[in-house]
Image (cartoon, helix red, strand yellow):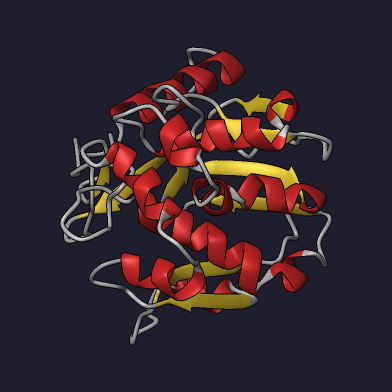
Protein backbone atom coordinates (compact mmCIF):
# COMPACT_ATOMS: atom_id res chain seq x y z
CA UNK A 1 0.00 0.00 0.00
CA UNK A 2 3.08 2.28 -0.09
CA UNK A 3 2.34 3.13 3.54
CA UNK A 4 4.82 3.95 6.26
CA UNK A 5 4.91 1.29 8.96
CA UNK A 6 4.99 2.13 12.65
CA UNK A 7 5.38 -0.53 15.32
CA UNK A 8 4.16 -0.07 18.86
CA UNK A 9 5.18 -3.01 21.02
CA UNK A 10 6.29 -3.83 24.52
CA UNK A 11 9.99 -3.03 24.78
CA UNK A 12 12.26 -5.76 23.39
CA UNK A 13 15.99 -6.13 23.94
CA UNK A 14 16.35 -8.32 20.84
CA UNK A 15 14.62 -6.97 17.72
CA UNK A 16 14.68 -10.12 15.63
CA UNK A 17 11.27 -9.89 13.91
CA UNK A 18 11.22 -9.00 10.23
CA UNK A 19 8.78 -6.14 10.86
CA UNK A 20 11.49 -4.16 12.64
CA UNK A 21 13.50 -3.95 9.43
CA UNK A 22 10.44 -2.70 7.52
CA UNK A 23 9.32 -0.08 10.04
CA UNK A 24 9.89 3.64 9.67
CA UNK A 25 9.01 4.16 13.33
CA UNK A 26 9.45 1.87 16.34
CA UNK A 27 7.65 3.08 19.46
CA UNK A 28 7.96 0.99 22.61
CA UNK A 29 6.42 0.92 26.05
CA UNK A 30 7.80 -0.95 29.05
CA UNK A 31 6.25 -4.34 29.77
CA UNK A 32 4.77 -3.33 33.11
CA UNK A 33 4.08 -6.03 35.68
CA UNK A 34 1.05 -3.92 36.59
CA UNK A 35 -0.19 -1.52 33.92
CA UNK A 36 -1.68 0.68 36.62
CA UNK A 37 1.87 2.05 36.77
CA UNK A 38 1.42 3.55 33.31
CA UNK A 39 -1.94 5.09 34.13
CA UNK A 40 -0.71 6.55 37.41
CA UNK A 41 2.15 8.18 35.49
CA UNK A 42 -0.02 9.86 32.85
CA UNK A 43 -3.42 10.44 34.48
CA UNK A 44 -4.75 12.12 37.60
CA UNK A 45 -7.45 10.76 39.88
CA UNK A 46 -8.85 7.24 39.89
CA UNK A 47 -11.82 7.46 37.52
CA UNK A 48 -9.92 5.35 34.98
CA UNK A 49 -9.38 2.60 37.56
CA UNK A 50 -13.02 2.46 38.57
CA UNK A 51 -14.02 2.30 34.90
CA UNK A 52 -11.67 -0.59 34.18
CA UNK A 53 -12.95 -2.44 37.24
CA UNK A 54 -16.42 -2.59 35.65
CA UNK A 55 -14.89 -5.42 33.64
CA UNK A 56 -12.76 -7.01 36.34
CA UNK A 57 -13.68 -10.54 35.26
CA UNK A 58 -14.35 -9.98 31.55
CA UNK A 59 -10.97 -8.85 30.26
CA UNK A 60 -11.45 -5.07 30.41
CA UNK A 61 -9.23 -4.80 33.50
CA UNK A 62 -6.69 -7.23 32.06
CA UNK A 63 -3.14 -6.08 32.81
CA UNK A 64 -4.04 -4.38 36.08
CA UNK A 65 -2.61 -6.37 39.02
CA UNK A 66 -3.80 -9.98 38.76
CA UNK A 67 -6.64 -9.46 36.29
CA UNK A 68 -6.70 -11.70 33.23
CA UNK A 69 -6.90 -10.30 29.71
CA UNK A 70 -5.43 -7.25 28.00
CA UNK A 71 -8.02 -4.46 28.05
CA UNK A 72 -5.96 -1.95 30.00
CA UNK A 73 -2.88 -2.76 27.90
CA UNK A 74 -4.59 -2.28 24.54
CA UNK A 75 -6.00 1.06 25.63
CA UNK A 76 -2.66 2.18 27.11
CA UNK A 77 -1.10 1.79 23.68
CA UNK A 78 -3.89 3.87 22.12
CA UNK A 79 -3.45 6.55 24.74
CA UNK A 80 0.30 6.61 24.11
CA UNK A 81 -0.22 6.95 20.36
CA UNK A 82 -2.69 9.79 20.83
CA UNK A 83 -0.58 11.76 23.31
CA UNK A 84 3.10 11.09 22.59
CA UNK A 85 3.06 10.65 18.83
CA UNK A 86 0.18 12.81 17.68
CA UNK A 87 2.40 15.21 15.71
CA UNK A 88 3.85 12.31 13.70
CA UNK A 89 0.39 10.88 13.06
CA UNK A 90 -0.92 14.26 11.94
CA UNK A 91 1.50 14.15 8.99
CA UNK A 92 -0.66 11.43 7.42
CA UNK A 93 -4.18 11.76 6.04
CA UNK A 94 -5.14 8.14 6.81
CA UNK A 95 -4.25 5.83 9.69
CA UNK A 96 -4.53 2.05 9.95
CA UNK A 97 -4.50 0.70 13.49
CA UNK A 98 -4.08 -3.05 13.38
CA UNK A 99 -2.46 -6.11 14.89
CA UNK A 100 0.91 -7.52 13.91
CA UNK A 101 -0.26 -11.15 13.99
CA UNK A 102 -2.80 -11.11 11.14
CA UNK A 103 -2.60 -13.64 8.30
CA UNK A 104 -4.17 -12.28 5.09
CA UNK A 105 -5.84 -14.50 2.50
CA UNK A 106 -6.86 -11.61 0.23
CA UNK A 107 -5.61 -8.05 -0.35
CA UNK A 108 -7.08 -5.47 1.99
CA UNK A 109 -10.19 -3.83 0.47
CA UNK A 110 -9.87 -0.25 -0.72
CA UNK A 111 -11.99 2.11 1.38
CA UNK A 112 -12.71 5.82 1.41
CA UNK A 113 -11.20 8.23 3.90
CA UNK A 114 -14.47 9.66 5.16
CA UNK A 115 -15.44 6.96 7.65
CA UNK A 116 -14.13 4.84 10.50
CA UNK A 117 -13.71 1.41 8.92
CA UNK A 118 -13.77 -1.62 11.22
CA UNK A 119 -13.18 -5.22 10.16
CA UNK A 120 -16.36 -7.30 10.39
CA UNK A 121 -17.09 -9.70 13.23
CA UNK A 122 -15.66 -10.19 16.73
CA UNK A 123 -17.81 -7.44 18.24
CA UNK A 124 -18.67 -9.16 21.55
CA UNK A 125 -21.49 -6.75 22.36
CA UNK A 126 -19.62 -3.65 21.17
CA UNK A 127 -17.29 -3.08 18.21
CA UNK A 128 -14.22 -5.08 17.14
CA UNK A 129 -11.02 -3.45 18.41
CA UNK A 130 -8.52 -5.35 16.23
CA UNK A 131 -8.38 -3.40 12.96
CA UNK A 132 -9.42 0.18 12.20
CA UNK A 133 -8.89 2.46 9.19
CA UNK A 134 -9.74 6.13 9.72
CA UNK A 135 -8.82 9.69 8.72
CA UNK A 136 -6.21 11.27 10.95
CA UNK A 137 -8.57 14.18 11.67
CA UNK A 138 -10.58 11.72 13.81
CA UNK A 139 -7.53 10.52 15.75
CA UNK A 140 -8.62 12.05 19.05
CA UNK A 141 -12.05 10.43 18.91
CA UNK A 142 -10.96 7.00 17.64
CA UNK A 143 -8.02 6.71 20.04
CA UNK A 144 -9.50 8.62 22.98
CA UNK A 145 -10.99 5.73 24.93
CA UNK A 146 -8.77 6.28 27.99
CA UNK A 147 -9.82 9.91 28.24
CA UNK A 148 -13.42 8.71 28.08
CA UNK A 149 -12.80 6.13 30.82
CA UNK A 150 -11.18 8.77 33.02
CA UNK A 151 -14.10 11.16 32.73
CA UNK A 152 -16.24 12.10 35.71
CA UNK A 153 -19.20 9.76 36.01
CA UNK A 154 -18.07 7.35 33.29
CA UNK A 155 -17.52 4.43 35.64
CA UNK A 156 -21.11 4.59 36.87
CA UNK A 157 -22.42 4.47 33.30
CA UNK A 158 -20.46 1.39 32.16
CA UNK A 159 -22.39 -1.86 32.58
CA UNK A 160 -20.88 -4.50 34.84
CA UNK A 161 -18.89 -7.24 33.06
CA UNK A 162 -18.08 -4.93 30.17
CA UNK A 163 -15.23 -5.84 27.86
CA UNK A 164 -12.89 -3.83 25.63
CA UNK A 165 -15.28 -4.01 22.68
CA UNK A 166 -18.21 -2.72 24.74
CA UNK A 167 -16.24 0.21 26.12
CA UNK A 168 -14.79 1.10 22.73
CA UNK A 169 -18.31 1.36 21.29
CA UNK A 170 -19.45 3.46 24.24
CA UNK A 171 -16.53 5.86 23.80
CA UNK A 172 -17.21 6.31 20.07
CA UNK A 173 -20.85 7.05 20.83
CA UNK A 174 -19.72 9.52 23.49
CA UNK A 175 -17.54 11.32 20.93
CA UNK A 176 -20.30 11.34 18.31
CA UNK A 177 -18.53 9.27 15.64
CA UNK A 178 -20.70 6.15 15.81
CA UNK A 179 -22.58 7.20 12.68
CA UNK A 180 -19.27 7.20 10.79
CA UNK A 181 -18.56 3.52 11.46
CA UNK A 182 -18.54 1.22 8.42
CA UNK A 183 -17.50 -2.43 8.15
CA UNK A 184 -14.73 -4.02 6.05
CA UNK A 185 -15.20 -7.61 4.85
CA UNK A 186 -12.79 -9.81 6.79
CA UNK A 187 -9.83 -10.99 4.74
CA UNK A 188 -7.52 -11.78 7.67
CA UNK A 189 -7.34 -13.77 10.88
CA UNK A 190 -5.00 -13.82 13.87
CA UNK A 191 -2.37 -16.54 14.14
CA UNK A 192 0.48 -17.57 16.39
CA UNK A 193 3.32 -20.06 16.53
CA UNK A 194 4.27 -22.44 19.31
CA UNK A 195 5.89 -20.51 22.13
CA UNK A 196 4.07 -17.22 21.56
CA UNK A 197 2.65 -15.81 24.77
CA UNK A 198 -0.99 -14.83 25.19
CA UNK A 199 -3.06 -13.06 27.84
CA UNK A 200 -6.44 -14.37 26.79
CA UNK A 201 -7.01 -16.88 24.00
CA UNK A 202 -4.62 -19.88 23.78
CA UNK A 203 -3.61 -21.27 20.36
CA UNK A 204 -6.31 -23.33 18.65
CA UNK A 205 -6.02 -25.71 15.74
CA UNK A 206 -3.28 -25.67 13.14
CA UNK A 207 -3.83 -23.52 10.07
CA UNK A 208 -4.77 -25.97 7.31
CA UNK A 209 -1.69 -26.70 5.21
CA UNK A 210 0.76 -25.58 7.91
CA UNK A 211 2.66 -27.57 10.53
CA UNK A 212 3.65 -24.57 12.68
CA UNK A 213 1.05 -21.77 12.42
CA UNK A 214 -1.94 -21.94 14.76
CA UNK A 215 -5.27 -20.16 14.54
CA UNK A 216 -6.17 -18.00 17.53
CA UNK A 217 -9.85 -17.39 16.79
CA UNK A 218 -11.60 -19.98 14.64
CA UNK A 219 -14.51 -17.61 14.00
CA UNK A 220 -12.15 -15.13 12.30
CA UNK A 221 -10.75 -17.90 10.09
CA UNK A 222 -14.18 -19.16 9.05
CA UNK A 223 -15.37 -15.65 8.21
CA UNK A 224 -12.29 -14.89 6.10
CA UNK A 225 -12.60 -18.19 4.23
CA UNK A 226 -16.30 -17.58 3.53
CA UNK A 227 -15.40 -14.20 2.08
CA UNK A 228 -12.70 -15.73 -0.08
CA UNK A 229 -15.09 -18.32 -1.46
CA UNK A 230 -17.58 -15.55 -2.21
CA UNK A 231 -14.94 -13.49 -3.98
CA UNK A 232 -13.27 -16.26 -5.96
CA UNK A 233 -15.81 -19.09 -6.09
CA UNK A 234 -15.87 -22.45 -4.37
CA UNK A 235 -13.39 -23.97 -6.80
CA UNK A 236 -10.49 -21.77 -5.74
CA UNK A 237 -7.63 -23.84 -4.35
CA UNK A 238 -7.02 -23.08 -0.68
Q: Is residue 95 above or below residue 183?
A: below
Residue 216 visible (yes or no)? no
What's the residue at 37%, 78% (across, down)?
30
Give percent across and percent down for residue 191.
33, 46
Quarter where residue 57 is shown: top left
Q: Is residue 57 above or below residue 193?
A: above
12 sits left or right of 109 in the view:
left
Give percent across and percent down for residue 93.
84, 55
Residue 38 visible (yes or no)? yes
Give percent across and percent down for residue 3.
73, 60
What's the residue at 53%, 46% (across, down)?
152
Give percent across and percent down for residue 233.
55, 13
Q: In which quadrant of the rendered image does the C terminus lie? A: top left
134 sits left or right of 81 in the view:
right
What's the residue at 76%, 72% (across, down)?
87
Q: Is residue 202 above or below residue 31?
A: above
What's the residue at 49%, 47% (across, down)?
149
Amino acid sequence: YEADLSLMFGKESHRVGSLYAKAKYVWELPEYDDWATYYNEVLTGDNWYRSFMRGATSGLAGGLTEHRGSGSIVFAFRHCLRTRYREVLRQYDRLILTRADYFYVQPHPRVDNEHVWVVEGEDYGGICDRHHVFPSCLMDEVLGVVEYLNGDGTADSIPLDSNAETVLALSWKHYGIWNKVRRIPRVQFTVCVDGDTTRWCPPGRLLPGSDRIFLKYITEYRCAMRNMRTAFGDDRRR
